[in-house]
Amino acid sequence: MRDALAKSTNKEFSARPREFESMTTTHEYDVVVVGAGTSGCYAAATIASEGLDVVIVERKTAEEAGHIACGDALKGANAFPDAIPKEQIEPAFTNTDVDHGRFEIPQEDSVLEIPVPGELAVIDRWEYGRLLIEGAEQRGVEFHYDTVVQDVTQDASGRVTGVRGKKKGEVVQYEADVTIDGAGALSLLQDKADLSDATFDTNVSYSQFCSAYREIVEVDEPVEWSDALVFKPAEVAAGYIWYFPRTETTINAGLGFQMTEQPMKLVEDLKQDLRARPEFENATVTDKLGAALPTRRPYDSAVAPGFMAVGDAAGHVNPTTGGGIAGAAYAGKYAGEQAVRAIEQGDVSESALWHYNERVMDHFGARYASLDVYNILSTAIDVDGLTGLLARVPGEKFAEALYSGTTSFGPRLIAQTAKESYGFWREIYQFYETKNAADDVMRHYERYPRRPSAMEGWQKERDRLMETVYDVTGAEPKY
Ligand SMILES: Cc1cc2nc3c(=O)[nH]c(=O)nc-3n(C[C@H](O)[C@H](O)[C@H](O)COP(=O)(O)OP(=O)(O)OC[C@H]3O[C@@H](n4cnc5c(N)ncnc54)[C@H](O)[C@@H]3O)c2cc1C
């Protein structure tokens, strides 16, 4: 490994490109981050704040960067890591009045109003993206736009040494002590790198993702539900339509489905639902975007020698709501802090980066792994069963399960709701058994290993718990 500390104190030298006869431009940094999204910006801003040289390589243009497909609902809006503080991104919070979810269940002719715990804002996502980039720049992060990363470089021992890509037809090479993958869902970097000797989670497949599409819709009259996130089950059980009010007259309308299901005609299905709602008469669509997002448990390990993955690239998304902004911000912070520590100690091995995994699991990873169990249930239950269940289990119990990963739903409550829930006892009992299995999974993640060598035994026990999950839900194995 190069003398990282000496290099990091010599910015003039480290950030200067080297031109080669082969027309490859080589850049040297302490850390190269791929992706100017939430996770990449927070990782890089954290690293730059400690005085290290860091670049973000982004495929989009400077104008387009930060324009990302999203429902615009920001849960946990009260607390953001210090590297880019809340005050800096707050101007993009366009609606802070939302305090509940409104679940429309046409099959049951009912509407459930369920409180959303904690602070929530609906945001102007592109403006938020720009403010993030501005915040990272102010901390000293360099941005290289129009640069598509196409490969990962590794030395003979397998340590990741940087990335290679193209900028306007020219080959560009980045050499760094640590490479951070913030390239989002289904990141290309993980296809290119050989991480088979590391603990890094490579058990990733399409069925663990959701495909989603959204439009920004302007209406003439204020909508009645501007204080609510509106959800509605789609035609397939593991899919839903959403209407999130950026303002009273600007609505983020979208839908998503689990990739285990028959593909939905996203654009057409959304159009159909919009047409059927009187509040969208004469509406105009001002923006359209779609993308994949992970709806899975977080990666068992998101580190390999010289390499870390953050945000969507490591499955740091609430798998029941699809909310990934807060997880991406904190994963960025934790990865950034660990990268700095490792570089300062001259050791970027898997063990040296490991503590990043522990902090993710401690903060939200255990919760998301347990929420994944409910996501697995939703893929196994048909749409009538799901909507029937939704309409009959008390709303606050769903809210608990949706956000905290556990709920106090137990036998006494089942008995109390027995009369109203006639016809759905099987689903309700299944929900109860699923809750018990999810609680066991959460407890196991709370004992996440302290070192890479303990990983195998921990995974074995987790996989045993997942067998119970598949048994009680009747779902196909997801991993
Ligand atoms: C339709 C939809 C709706 C969503 N709704 C919500 C919501 O309401 N609330 C919420 O909290 N979350 C939501 N999410 C999830 C949320 O958007 C993500 O979890 C979050 O953006 C993850 O941030 P990230 O930085 O990890 O990745 P991203 O924001 O995806 O950023 C990745 C960046 O990497 C760049 N990149 C990718 N590949 C390369 C490459 N090869 N070379 C160079 N650059 C590259 C991309 O251009 C992009 O800028 C939604 C996602 C989708 C798709």
Image (tube, rainbow, N blue to C red):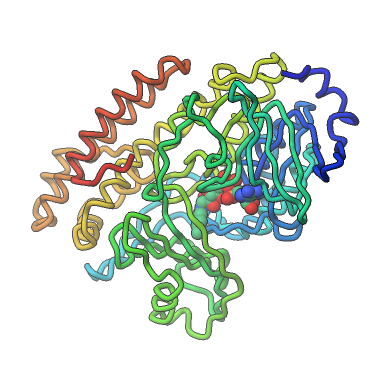
Q: Quadrant of the N terminus?
A: top right
The image shows residue 451, relative to residue 328, as above or below, that is above
Residue at image position (80%, 36%) is 27
Comparing 164 with 39, the one in front is 164
129 over 172 or under it: above or below: below
> What residue is shown at x 29% (from left), y 23% (from top)?
461
* Relative vertical location of residue 420 with respect to residue 241 in this rendering, above or below: above
Please state, as top left, top right, bottom left or bottom right, where the C terminus lies in the image: top left
At a point 48% along the width and 49% down the height, the residue shown is 323
In this rendering, is residue 112 above or below 465?
below
Q: Is 128 placed left or right of 295 in the picture?
A: right
Where residue 52 appears, as percent x and y from the top left, is 78, 27
Which residue is nearer to you in this view: 27 or 227? 27
Is residue 131 visible in this depiction of the protein?
yes
Residue 23 located left or right of residue 204: right
The answer to whether residue 431 is left or right of residue 366 is: left
Q: How many marks?
A: 0
